[in-house]
Image: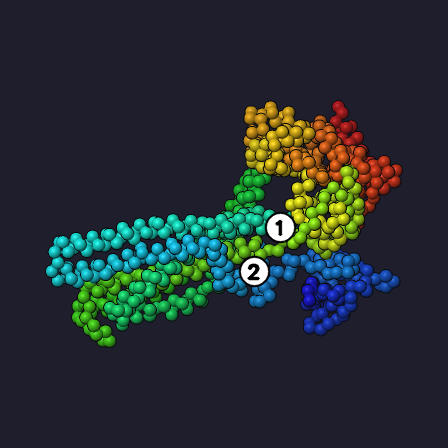
Amino acid sequence: MKSFIFEYDLGMDMNPLAGSLVFAEDGSITSSANGTELFRFFASEITEAVVHAGVGCGLLFAKAEGKEDRILCRFTMSGIKQAGEFAKIVNFFIANGTAAFPEEEEKRICETCGRPLMAEMNVCVFCYSKLGVMKRALSFAKPYIKQITYSQVLGLVPRITVMLSPLFIRVLVNNHLELQMGTWFDILLICGAMLLTRVIGDGFFIYTSRIFNRATIAITNDLRVEAYAKLQSHSMSLFAKRTPGDLIRRIMDDTSTINEFVTDLGRWVVDMFFNFAIAFIILFYFNWQLTLLVFIPVPIVIFLLRRFWGMMMARFERHWRWGSRCNSILHDIIKGIRTVKAFGNEEKEIKKFSSATHRHAKIGEENEVLWSILFPPIGFFMGLGEFLVLFIGGWMVLNGSWWLFDANMQIGDLVLFTMYLGFIYGPLRWMVHFPRWLANTTTSMVKVFEVLDDESELKPVAKPKNVPIAGTVDFDGVFFGYKSYEPVLKNISVDIKPGEMIGIVGKSGVGKSTLINLTMRLYDPNTGRIRINNTDLRHMDSDHLHENMGVVFQDSFLFAGSFYDNIVYGKPDATFEEVIAASKAANAHDFIVQTSDGYNTHIGEGGQTLSGGERQRLSIARAIIKNPEILILDEATSSLDVETEASIQESLNRITEGRTTIAIAHRLSTLRNADRLIVLSEGGVEEVGTHAELLKKKGMYYNLVMAQRQNSRKQEEEAQP
């Protein structure tokens, strides 16, 4: 059963006490201290949980009708935030009859080992299956298994040609140089054979590498596209929880790391295994006793690698996390460079980025220092076998048999042994570096797979009901909060008729933009329903819904490209005549044709070369080009001068006529012609009516209008000389 635990630290007598207050999914509230249950009751027995901040300590108490307030616990001020969360969760249960818990609290501790989870990760780096992660990464190679297999089979040719060189050299040394019985032609013949095999091997290597690399690049592209598509299918909650730098790094950098892993593992593991096996067979054939000396250090090396594996995994994860932080800081600084320069904070931002990169470099340096400490002992033990082979082999060349080694050895045999030692120790040395490489790679794998596995709150519909969008928009008992137990919108029930213009007004923070986000189904309600034509939005296909909606946001984001590109973004198959018609309707045509290349003029990323009014008009043209059934205006004329606002308002009045429109406006005067106004407060819908009706009522809307008029008069008086 899920629960939320608040650990308080004071007793009723104000003395220190380690206690816990638990709210369970069934609505029960239990207090315990020192292993003893103090009390237990149900949230249905009270009307509200309240937090009171006193002097030096706080109180969490419960209210109930006809009864005295009941103190649940005392705590020092360090617990005030958690106490507030506890109260919100209890109050949500009282209001709705269901429990909702903060996701982040449930995931911050590993259920297997009890360790705290790393920042920006919901998977424990100590407990996840490394083998399972690798298998999953390699599963992306399945569509290209034929190309990979073909390249690997043909790749045996260059591997074999490389393995032949020591045999040629052995024959050359033993049969021709050591005994001085060879002729220049014999030497030329052997050298020519070595050269020919090398040319053949290199030719096959180039051919197979092209096939193999083409397949691995396709694997990376598939993984990257799948991760990006997963992001696009998510609700906005994912982007609220993760930084842009984190997501960019997961999709671009981490997929590249996985590609390198798949490429290197697919090619070099086969190379290493094949070379190791052939070299071992050849050496074992010539002298099995000497060959066994090679493997003396292997158990020691394996022990050392297992001993330090967990430490390296944690360190590489920390290095990754700070790299992601550097990316996020850099992204924010570049995106907000105008604000940075306007406030003269260049030095501050340089120090901020420098601090993060210094920390990132410091962790990387510590990792390298640790590795430089670990690797020499491992390399030393690896070299023991090579030393023994050279020492005993050299003795046998000079003196014949030695102790248990009773075979004579020629110089060519020793040369062959020393050359094949590279094929034996190459894979072993590669295995020494493999944990470090794998630790870095599996971290990237987990990051990418977290994106792929993250369940979207917007569930796809198997059989969508794509009804006509022109019907009634109905909000039925809608509750919503970005934290489900802390609702921003409470019990919203409103019907919007076809062709009606609705204005949404209220103070900042009451949920106006949240309401239109729900209408566009960027989020789903926690409880309640939003219906169009009596069909729940959750039963519709999102593409169908968005194809019939046009949106103009307060911050009009424009993409790098031309005027034409940005306008047809709302309807990619639009004709040039439709683009011009939409531009004229939005009062944008005149300033577009005055630019150097007209509609083909490039405006730069974000449209920073344009004025606010020009960006807003392009945004309006982009919204109306697809002739949407529902038009949403989120502060479409805010932050504009009076003349520009009047021009844009004139175009909006023209395009909203006869079209279902939901509008939020900073200046209430722009909504006076709306068919109805919905006034939101912290408690939900406060008032509904026309501009005239609400003024006569002299409620919240009246107070908002009067406050704006008074502020406008004050500004006019101050502007007079």
Residue position marked by numbered label 2 in the rendering:
123
- In the rendered structure, the answer to whether residue 153 lies left or right of residue 547 reads left
- Would you call the spot at circle 1 few (<14 residues within 10 Å), some (14-19), or many (20 or more)? some
Please tell me the numbered disc located at residue 596: none
x, y (%) of residue 379?
35, 62
Looking at the rendered image, the disc whose residue lies closer to the viewer, 1 or 2, is 1
Q: Quadrant where the C terminus lies?
A: top right
Mark 2 Cα shell of 10 Å, populated few (<14), some (14-19), many (≥20): some
Compared to 66, does 256 lie above or below?
A: above
Residue visible at 45% across and 64% down in the picture: 308
Q: Amino acid at mark 2?
A: Val
Q: Nearer the viewer, residue 85 or 276?
A: 276
Pick whichever, 313 or 98, lies toward us: 98
Label 2: which secondary element: loop
Q: Residue at x 81, y 64 (%)?
A: 45
> Which residue bears the numbered disc 1?
234
**Residue in front for this viewpoint, 18 or 515:** 515
Would residue 560 be seen by someone viewing this image from the given angle? yes
Q: As displayed, is residue 516 above or below residue 288?
A: above
Image-quadrant location for residue 592: top right
Query: Percent x, y for residue 609?
Result: 58, 31
Residue 30 lies in what quarter of the image? bottom right
Identity of the amino acid at label 1?
Answer: His
- Residue 376 placed where, x, y %? 36, 61
